[in-house]
Image (spheres, helix red, strand yellow):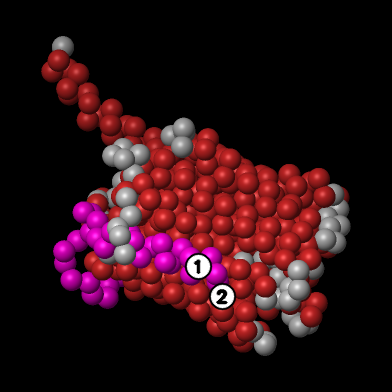
Amino acid sequence: MRSLSERASFWTAGAVVALALWTSACPTMIYPLYQADWDVTSTTVAWIFAAYPIALIPVLVVFGDLSDHIGRRAAILLGLAAELVGVLLFVLARDVTWLLIGRAFMGLGVGLSLSPASVAMVEFSAAGAEKRAGAVGTAVSAFGIALAMLVGGGLSQYAPYPLRLTFVVLAVVILGVGFVALGLPRHTPNETRLRWRVRAIVIPRGNRWIFTTGSIAFASSFLLGSLVLPLGAKIAHQLAGSDNALVTGSLLSVFAISIAVTALLAKRLDSWTTVILGAVFSAGAVWLFVVTGTTHSIVVFFLASACAGIGYSFDFAGGLTILNRYAAPHHRASMVSGGYLVGYISQGIGAPALGAIVTANGLRTGLLTGAIAFSVVFGVSLIGAMAVSRSLRTATAKHRRPETVFAD
């Protein structure tokens, strides 16, 4: 197959990122149907959701730098193949066990493809365009989430086979993107010539404070996802009064639309300012979901979804830009994989914990508990970004001062 141009490779990598997020969110609009048709509890739904990050975490640990050795294309193709298996298991599912295994394969696939695709977007960008790659990566991630909401909501409400058809559509799209991805370059200049071996994710010693701050910002976006994706449709139906799946999907797609619009603004801002704004909007979003439970207002739910999208976008774009910008070239995939690892660990803990609280104490109590716990993380992200950015500015000023004196 003929190799793609640099521009086409950039957008193909972006399509892989979008597919990863579509795959991640694809059951969101179907969870209420499983609860109604299969008598599944909120705890079980949370574990189905969490099977994805739980499977993804060891992939990031063991294979986090795999694409630095075998090439971005090979890692992306392996990931798309695993995503396809997971989606087909949802098509054929007969009980919860099928769903758990399917989500595990989805996690495996996203773990193999998302980090190399994100790095490939940077590598196929013009020099100095890391911010643009981060912003576009965030926007296409939002597009993937929006597709999961709108396609899932529309097909489950109006098309036949509501438990399965949305996954058939996704499987066809994965096959199409996989075919195009065959044309990606086999290797890129930033890959290492060293032979791959199993080892932990490597974070260079000088990058560890930067990594910590960037990964906590990343984790903030994933924590928002652990609330919106498994519980969003339930909140809209039970607390905001929406009884139409397409309407619910449209309301939840505001989350994704806000991510995309905010990403365009985020690329114009300093990455540290982006992280600070992300923490503020993220905290506002979780408390607006709590207010939705007390007011039963679909307008407040709309505002909560929009605020969550803004917070998610700032958190995700800021964290990704920090991890890419400050990484040594041969450790870039490892740094980004480490960021995803921290994010998915937080999601793998947050989603089941919220699900258990909702099952035991009700949706409103679960939202209140989640808002308190998540706000602590957002506060840490805010303080960390302010402290590290100030430290970097101070170090830069000290470095420049002797040159200024010499010039005088």
As helix, strand or loop, the secondary structure at mark 1 comes to: helix
Tell me the residue that label 2 is attached to. 87
> Residue 340: where, in percent of width, then height?
44, 61
> Residue 348: where, in percent of width, then height?
55, 69
Residue 225 — which label? none
Q: Nearer the viewer, mark 2 or mark 1?
A: 1
The stretch of residues the image draws in magenta is: 171-200
Q: Amino acid at mark 2?
A: Val
Q: Residue at x 26, y 68 (%)?
A: 70
> Residue 288: where, in percent of width, then height?
73, 48
**Dot 2 alpha-carbon crowd within 10 angstroms: few under 14, some 14 to 19, many 20 or more:** many
Q: Is residue 377 left or right of residue 166?
A: left
Quadrant holding the C terminus:
top left
Q: Specify whether residue 191 is painted magenta.
A: yes
> Residue 283: where, in percent of width, then height?
63, 47
Q: Amino acid at mark 1?
A: Ile
As helix, strand or loop, the secondary structure at mark 2 comes to: helix
Tell me the residue that label 1 is attached to. 174
Instruction: Decide if residue 59 is in sight here.
Output: yes
Instruction: Decide if residue 61 is in sight here.
Output: no
N-terminal-most mark, 2 or 1: 2
Q: Are marks 2 and 1 in contact (CB under 8 Å)?
A: yes
Q: Is residue 16 left or right of residue 171?
A: left
Q: Residue at x 57, y 52 (%)?
A: 143
Which of the 4 image quadrants contains residue 182? Answer: bottom left
Q: Is residue 283 left or right of residue 336?
A: right
Quadrant holding the N terminus:
bottom left
